[in-house]
Amino acid sequence: MFDLDKSKFGPWAIVTGASSGIGKEFARQIAASGINVVLVARRLPLLEAWGQELAQRYGVQYRAVQADLSQPDFMQVLKPVTQALEIGLLVSNAGTGIPGEFLSIPEEMLLQIVQLNAMSHMRLVHHYGRQLVQRGRGGIVLVSAMGAMDGIPYMANDAASKAYVTSLGQGLHQEFGKAGIHTTVLMPGPTETPIIEKFGLNNMPLPIKPMPVEQCVAEGLAALNANRAMFLTGRIYRLMSKVIPKAITRKMNSRMLAQGLINGQPRLAHMTK
């Protein structure tokens, strides 16, 4: 676990996709640093239960916000809740994936993916980034995806939308850095979260065992603290990304995701739950 400086990144942090997986662990490690948390996701009962546990365990305050970031009006729900709070950290983590052949996915679903995986991040950063810059300290973590910039077969639209986030964050790292704001794009390597099962990969012999979610988030927070523009979690994945040609990586992803589709026909897999 990485201990954040609450005088810099507190007193409040916003975490989207906070009810499961990487987002849930971000909320835990941030709360463990003594920073209050605004938990955002679609399933309010899970958020309330998690917020109460964090409050009892770490002595922090929380706000639970039910919002669907795949819908254009989500900011109308979030803004009133956070208006009176001093936000020192934004973890924009919510995202989703629909493994499958591009032409087999309805256009409406493709558009929802772009809204959730790209546009929601932009809107969150535009609103809360303004507050952070005016404050003169704080941080932003934009959670992208490993391989997003290189293309992922059977998740072509998903990867493309995450590539937007990667580019946005790296550009803002320079802009916001002049105002004392740390901005980091986090590229999680394969991590032990519910998404593995939803993609139909849980019963497959993966080349490397997924890393614990605690490690993924701790490395991400350490990268934020060090003001890294972009960071890929997992030492072995960083090594692989340097030595394995992108064309081979795409072929490997193609085989795994195609087999995952055969194994389980994954449905729409929301990370916002």
Image (tube, rainbow, N blue to C red):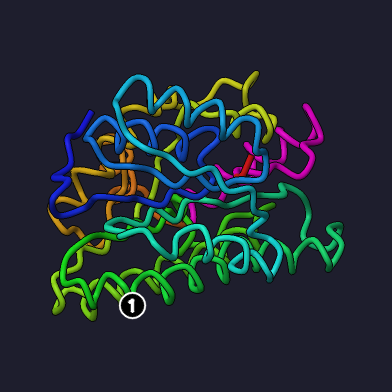
| Closest to the observer, 96 or 71 | 71
Would you say the magenta stretch is mainly helix, strand or loop?
helix
Q: Position of residue 39 (x, y in %)?
A: 49, 44
Q: Quadrant of the N terminus?
A: top left
Q: Position of residue 168 (x, y in %)?
A: 40, 74
Q: Position of residue 230 (x, y in %)?
A: 28, 59
Which residue is at a point 26% across and 30% down the rendered structure image? Answer: 32
* Element type where label 1 sits in the image: helix
Q: Quadrant of the C terminus?
A: top right
| Closest to the observer, 230 or 83 | 83
Which residue is at a point 19% across and 58% down the rendered structure image? Answer: 228
Relative to residue 259, is residue 167 drawn left or right? left
> Does the magenta run of residues contain 251?
yes
Relative to residue 263, is residue 141 drawn left or right? left
Which residues lie in the magenta part?
Answer: 247-271
For residue 205, above or below residue 96: above
Callout 1 crowding tier (Cα within 10 Å): few <14, some 14–19, many ≥20: few
* Res. 153 image quadrant: bottom right
Amino acid of disc 1 = Arg
> Circle 1 is placed at which residue position?
130
For residue 85, above or below residue 108: above
Which residue is at a point 67% across and 38% down the rendered structure image? Answer: 43
| Closest to the observer, 47 or 175 | 47
Relative to residue 269, is residue 92 drawn left or right? left
Which residue is at a point 16% across and 72% down the rendered structure image? Answer: 136
Q: Position of residue 200 (x, y in %)?
A: 69, 30
For residue 235, above or below residue 110: above
> Does the magenta run of residues contain 256?
yes
Q: Residue furthest front?
A: 84
